[in-house]
Image (cartoon, coloured by chain):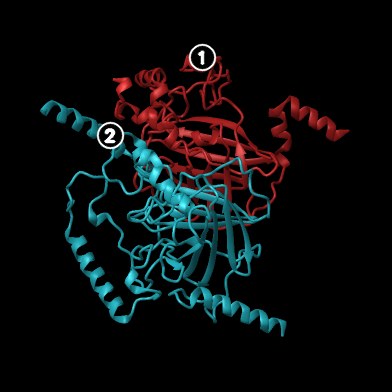
Chain colours: A red, B cyan
């Protein structure tokens, strides 16, 4: 009865549920730490827009309601992203040109944190030699060095990832990001001064609470934070499949340079 | 007795595999390490080594290793190349193309292996089936499958899937090429993860004996399932597409597009033979394409200092736009000069 009551409370009040499961102790992985291994996916519309947003049409009327944007509540703590006033114009321009300019449309690697809340699963491989995050989207991946922190070399899409544990929370400090990835289809962006600190806490067998603190003094007035649950993919025989989207992007990127056939001249 | 029989069986099969090749047999005074949960431990950085051709020069016949004299010649050549590379600080080849300057290229450490192909014994690809010969002739309206680029640029599809930065396929990804030949193995209970630097590929290979995904799902990297045979990791991969490719540059070996059918069955064997050597063997079985199976051997040397970088091939593929737009500009200029 007590358990049933807990379940009902958990279902109705997710926030309360998180507090109640604070005593949850995650199983141990081979490295002795909380086991985060498995396939995970966000279930929200943050990839459309991190901030609060109403439903609206997509960029192509030809696809009807397929490709239209679902409404969603902000995953940003405090609701909105603290842009410097002069940077908002770029976000608006990104949004206006999102059909062709969103790096997701071009099948570019999703960057951090975007890869974690795209509508594709990703797998956490927790090995004694380090942690690998493998994304289905664009075959992106990032290796998290759990040893002595390494300084970032040249800028990359998925960054230089140094991890450590704070109790049962995996903390990943990400630097060396090239700032070319967007945060979402709404055109939210940063620069190559972007610094992301992520926190992964397994709060029960099926959820990780994911938080990311985002700092970029050239674009934002102060650091800001997103948080959301990641859901464990428990489908029978779940595994990552291919989403090698390069070939889906080629006509968009290079179609204008193809030889025109006589019928199109 | 039974044990003795098994040992001799293993010896015979090892001889069959290693006898004619430069591959090391497992070292006697060395115990293969295990992971904390008891699997053989293959983890680490295992970068590929340039310099062994896919197919053996025909003149060498069934000889799998170089003689002392041939090897000395190869080492001398490598030394001359290293000197030339170190002096070449600007692009020595300024012709338009998509290759990098020669000094960017990894040259590798010379070895005695005469070809990556170790079976058939002549180190060469078996004959193509009649059906495959017809396919290769008729593909793309008679132009054949895109292999090495020869300047065709009507569309991006005139370039092979490696130039397009789509993938090098499961086998192509481990065959050493030009640069960024890193391979990393990670393990967790129930999985082995094989990661290739070029073009940022990751195979998360389940070991739990689950069935392959449906035949209706086709994957460029295939669908891999692994199991242990002693200290050897055996990975069976199926569910390929017929549009990825095999070969020295992931798309073919010189003069060959590396095309195979969707029926390809790849069997890979990973065996640590000493602290610093991992033998990678792969058997390619595709009766629709080749008249018999063939096997390659790539001995990998451990390098804990190797840094696997992010190879953002597509993101940095400026060449594709340049090649196509350049070809269009050339057409216009030819038309104008008429």
Q: Which callout, 2 or 1, points to the residue nearer the camera?
A: 2
Q: In x, y percent, where is residue A213? A: 50, 34
For disc 2, the chain is B
Using the image as rendered, state which of residue A238 and residue B8 is in the foreground. B8
Quarter of the image for the C terminus of chain A: give it.
Answer: top left
Quarter of the image for the N terminus of chain A: give it.
Answer: top right
Residue ranking furthest to the right: A1
Q: Which mark is residue B238?
A: none
B229 left or right of A172 in image: right
Q: Which residue is mark 1?
A: A57
Q: In x, y percent, where is residue A258? A: 31, 30
Using the image as rendered, state which of residue B186 and residue A113 is in the foreground. B186
Residue B21's image quarter? bottom left
Tell me the SS state at disc 2: helix
> How packed is label 2: few (under 14 Cα within 10 Å), some, or many (20 or more)?
many
Q: Residue at x 55, y 76 (%)?
A: B14
Measured Cα–Cα span from mark 2 to mark 1: 34 Å
> How packed is label 1: few (under 14 Cα within 10 Å), some, or many (20 or more)?
some
Q: In x, y percent, where is residue B172? A: 43, 54
Q: Residue at x 70, y 33 (%)?
A: A19
Q: Does residue B274 sit above or below B55 in this rendering?
A: below
A218 left or right of B237 in image: left
Tell me the SS state at disc 1: loop
Q: Is residue A223 visible?
A: yes
Q: Which residue is mark 2?
A: B324
Q: Does residue A208 sit above or below A132 in this rendering?
A: above
For disc 1, the chain is A
Residue B165's image quarter? top left
Q: Residue at x 34, y 46 (%)?
A: A154
B58 left or right of B7 in image: left
Q: In x, y percent, where is residue A82? A: 44, 23
Q: Is residue B161 visible?
A: no
């Amino acid at each position: 009865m007590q358990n049933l009551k807990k379940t009902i409370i958990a279902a109705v009040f997710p926030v309360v549920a998180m507090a109640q499961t604070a005593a949850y102790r995650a199983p141990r992985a081979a490295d002795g730490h909380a086991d985060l291994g498995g396939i995970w996916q966000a279930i929200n519309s943050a990839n459309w827009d991190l901030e609060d947003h109403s439903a609206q049409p997509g960029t192509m009327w030809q696809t009807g309601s397929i490709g239209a944007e679902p409404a969603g509540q902000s995953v940003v703590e405090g609701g909105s992203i603290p842009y410097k006033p002069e940077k908002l114009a770029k976000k608006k321009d990104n949004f206006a040109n999102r059909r062709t300019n969103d790096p997701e449309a071009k099948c570019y690697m999703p960057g951090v944190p975007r890869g974690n809340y795209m509508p594709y699963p990703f797998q956490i491989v927790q090995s004694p030699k380090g942690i690998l995050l493998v994304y289905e989207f664009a075959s992106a991946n990032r290796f998290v060095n759990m040893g002595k922190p390494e300084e970032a070399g040249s800028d990359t899409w998925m960054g230089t990832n140094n991890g450590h544990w704070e109790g049962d929370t995996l903390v990943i400090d990400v630097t060396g990001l090239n700032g070319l990835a967007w945060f979402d289809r709404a055109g939210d962006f940063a620069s190559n001064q972007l610094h992301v600190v992520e926190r992964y806490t397994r709060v029960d067998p099926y959820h990780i609470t994911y938080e990311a603190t985002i700092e970029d003094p050239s674009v934002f007035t102060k650091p800001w934070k997103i948080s959301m649950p990641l859901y464990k993919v428990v489908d029978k025989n779940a595994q990552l499949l291919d989403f090698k989207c390069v070939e889906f992007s080629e006509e968009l990127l290079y179609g204008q340079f193809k030889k025109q056939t006589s019928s199109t001249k | 007795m039974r044990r003795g029989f098994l040992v001799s069986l293993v010896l015979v099969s090892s001889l069959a595999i290693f006898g004619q090749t430069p591959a090391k047999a497992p070292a006697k005074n060395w115990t293969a390490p295990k992971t904390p949960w008891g699997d053989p431990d293959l983890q680490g950085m295992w970068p590929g080594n340039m310099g062994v051709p896919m197919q053996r020069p025909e003149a060498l016949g069934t000889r799998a290793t170089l003689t002392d004299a041939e090897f000395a010649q190869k080492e001398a050549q490598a030394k001359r190349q290293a000197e030339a590379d170190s002096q070449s600080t600007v692009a020595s080849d300024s012709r338009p193309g998509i290759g990098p300057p020669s000094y960017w290229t990894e040259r590798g450490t010379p070895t005695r292996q005469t070809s990556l192909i170790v079976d058939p014994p002549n180190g060469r690809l078996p004959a193509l089936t009649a059906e495959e010969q017809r396919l290769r002739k008729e593909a793309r309206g008679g132009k054949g499958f895109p292999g090495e680029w020869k300047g065709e640029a009507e569309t991006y599809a005139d370039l092979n899937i490696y130039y397009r930065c789509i993938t090098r396929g499961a086998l192509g990804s481990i065959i050493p090429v030009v640069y960024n030949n890193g391979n990393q193995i990670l393990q967790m209970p129930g999985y082995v993860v094989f990661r290739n630097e070029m073009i940022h590929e990751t195979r998360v290979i389940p070991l739990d004996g689950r069935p392959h995904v449906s035949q209706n799902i086709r994957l460029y990297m295939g669908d891999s399932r692994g199991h242990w045979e002693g200290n050897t990791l055996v990975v069976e991969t199926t569910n390929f597409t017929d549009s990825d490719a095999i070969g020295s540059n992931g798309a073919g070996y010189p003069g060959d597009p590396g095309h195979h059918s969707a029926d390809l069955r790849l069997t890979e064997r990973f065996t640590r033979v000493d602290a610093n050597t991992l033998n990678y063997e792969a058997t390619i079985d595709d009766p629709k394409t080749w008249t018999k199976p063939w096997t390659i051997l790539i001995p990998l040397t451990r390098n804990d200092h190797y840094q696997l970088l992010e190879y953002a091939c597509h993101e940095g593929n400026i060449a594709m736009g340049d090649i196509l737009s350049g070809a269009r500009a050339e057409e216009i200029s030819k038309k104008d000069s008429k």
